[in-house]
């Protein structure tokens, strides 16, 4: 007991000495009505008993008192930051000598006044590199702060091992604002920058809850705090994928500008997550094809006016909705010609599950335009993971067989061409038809009739009989 008392007495002297050094920066007497802010040290974090976060906001002359509810922690003035080494480096904590409790055990207290305004970050000597940090914000006087609001109030979900990007902004105070995580932790691999940018690549999956404080640039250092949760889905499929046979964002014939609107709705009572995977036309899809993560709360709907630019892409191909938590969402895809102020023309495109695609033995028919001058006919395919072989029969309007063409396509393959070119023929008969019989594998074949004058389009799809 004597040893413990001696240790506390010695540390108390050290505490006063260091806070006297802090006071020497700019002498300022303790103001009338000065108060003490209490901070609890527990569970590898600093928690201000007023704000509930690791940020303590006081006025000049007020005192901060730390209470150890757990052992092997320190209150050390300084900052922690990544050292910028190869692969992102490691976190390094650097003391600045203003105050230091040393490593203490449960039951210890450490306190002192802050006689000057400013921001005073600190960390734990043992756990600072693991994110155990705090900050004391000292204001010149009782501030006349308005309400500082962070936006958005909710953050988008993410996908493990995929890039994550979001941005926080603040209003109601004096810009510019500085943002910092004050409780909890964002997903591992995702960083919250001082400018409010959330960037990185989540290395784990689950729900990650944390709060962010925005501090304005006024002399009072006014603050606002907002709690967030980010749901990060695993990268492995959780259910059957849904195929959208064709998506595109590109110029077409006759001055057309084709785009693909995509809407997703979670029709379940639980949150779901997954990714939209784009497969470029003309080649088989791979596991490395580009993707965009989605997370949907119960009955939430999200909209992409043009899905490929939303993914940073353009061109022509197909897309899969790959669920990673829960089932695939309901979807509405619309292919349209964007005529600007003149409006849009287009058609809704169904989504296909594996059991909906044409299978071995299925025979389907696609009807050809009656007028090849005013209308053009494009023919397309999206095979599933087993590839597809099919026999095409071309018939004229009177029912005579014009040509028989066998075709084979690799797995997860998309192709769209002018109909005759697709089959290697010079032309199609006006008002005829096209038979499609699956001999191996599975796929969705589709024929698009496009008005050469308006670019308006109607499309036929084959399905499992």
Image: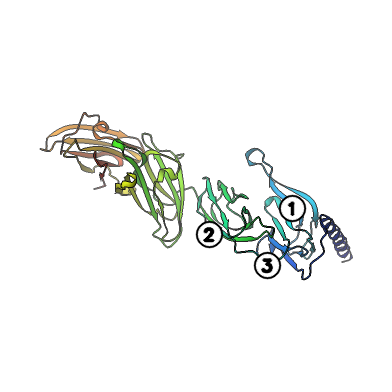
Q: Which residue is mark 1?
A: 126
Q: Dot 3, crowdedness within 10 Å: few (<14), some or many (≥20)?
A: few
C-alpha separation, residue under disc 2 versus residue under disc 3:
22 Å
Q: Secondary structure at mark 2?
A: loop
C-alpha separation, residue under disc 1 versus residue under disc 2:
34 Å
Q: Which residue is mark 3?
A: 50
> Residue 315 versus residue 374: which sits nearer the camera?
374
Question: Where is residue 270 drawn, in percent x and y?
Answer: 45, 61
Question: Where is residue 151 drawn, in percent x and y?
Answer: 54, 57
Question: What residue lies at 19% left-to-right and 33% top-to-bottom?
Answer: 428
Question: What residue lies at 46% left-to-right and 41% top-to-bottom?
Answer: 312
Which of the numbered marks, if any, corresponds to residue 368?
A: none
Res 310 quadrant in image: top left
Residue 249 lies left or right of residue 194; in this view the side is left
Q: Which residue is mark 2?
A: 153
- Pointer 2 or 3: first along the chain: 3
> Residue 147 versus residue 14: which sits nearer the camera?
147
Q: Dot 2, crowdedness within 10 Å: few (<14), some or many (≥20)?
A: few
Question: What residue lies at 87% left-to-right and 65% top-to-bottom?
Answer: 5
Question: Where is residue 334 drawn, in percent x and y?
Answer: 33, 48
| Colour theme | rainbow
């Amino acid at each position: 007991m004597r040893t413990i008392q001696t240790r506390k007495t010695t540390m108390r002297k050290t505490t006063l000495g260091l806070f006297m050094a802090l006071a020497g920066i700019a002498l300022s007497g303790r103001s009338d009505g000065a108060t003490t802010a209490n901070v609890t040290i527990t569970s590898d974090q600093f928690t201000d008993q007023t704000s509930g976060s690791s940020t303590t906001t006081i006025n000049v002359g007020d005192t901060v008192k730390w209470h150890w509810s757990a052992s092997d922690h320190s209150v050390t003035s300084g900052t922690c930051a990544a050292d910028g080494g190869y692969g992102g480096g490691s976190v390094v904590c650097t003391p600045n000598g203003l105050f230091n409790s040393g490593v203490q055990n449960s039951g210890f207290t450490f306190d002192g006044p802050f006689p000057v305004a400013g921001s005073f970050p600190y960390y734990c000597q043992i756990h600072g590199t693991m994110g155990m940090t705090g900050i004391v914000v000292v204001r010149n006087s009782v501030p006349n702060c308005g309400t500082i609001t962070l936006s958005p109030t909710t953050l988008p979900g993410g996908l493990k091992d995929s890039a994550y990007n979001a941005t926080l902004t603040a209003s109601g105070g004096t810009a510019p604002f500085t943002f910092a995580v004050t409780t909890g932790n964002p997903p591992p691999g995702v960083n919250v920058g001082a400018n409010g940018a959330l960037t990185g690549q989540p290395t784990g999956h689950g729900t990650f809850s944390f709060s962010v404080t925005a501090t304005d640039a006024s002399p009072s250092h006014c603050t606002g705090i907002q709690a967030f949760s980010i749901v990060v889905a695993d990268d492995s499929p959780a259910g059957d994928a849904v195929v959208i046979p064709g998506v595109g964002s590109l110029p077409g014939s006759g001055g057309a500008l084709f785009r693909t609107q995509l809407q997703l709705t979670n029709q379940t009572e639980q949150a779901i997550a997954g990714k939209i995977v784009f497969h470029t036309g003309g080649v088989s899809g791979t596991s490395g094809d580009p993707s965009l993560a989605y997370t949907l709360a119960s009955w939430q709907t999200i909209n992409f006016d043009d899905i490929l630019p939303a993914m940073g892409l353009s061109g022509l191909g197909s897309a899969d909705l790959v669920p990673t938590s829960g089932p695939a969402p309901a979807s509405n895809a619309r292919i349209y010609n964007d005529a600007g102020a003149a409006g849009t023309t287009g058609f809704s495109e169904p989504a296909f599950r594996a059991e909906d695609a044409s299978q071995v033995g299925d025979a389907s028919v696609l009807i050809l335009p009656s007028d090849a001058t005013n209308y053009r006919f494009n023919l397309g395919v999206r095979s599933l993971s087993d590839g597809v072989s099919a026999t095409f029969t071309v018939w004229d309007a009177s029912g005579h067989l014009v040509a028989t063409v066998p075709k084979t396509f690799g797995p997860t393959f998309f192709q769209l061409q002018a109909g005759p070119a697709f089959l290697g023929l010079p032309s199609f008969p006006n008002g005829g038809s096209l038979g499609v019989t699956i001999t191996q594998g599975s796929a969705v074949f589709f024929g698009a009739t496009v008005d050469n004058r308006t670019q308006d389009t109607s499309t036929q799809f084959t399905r499992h009989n």
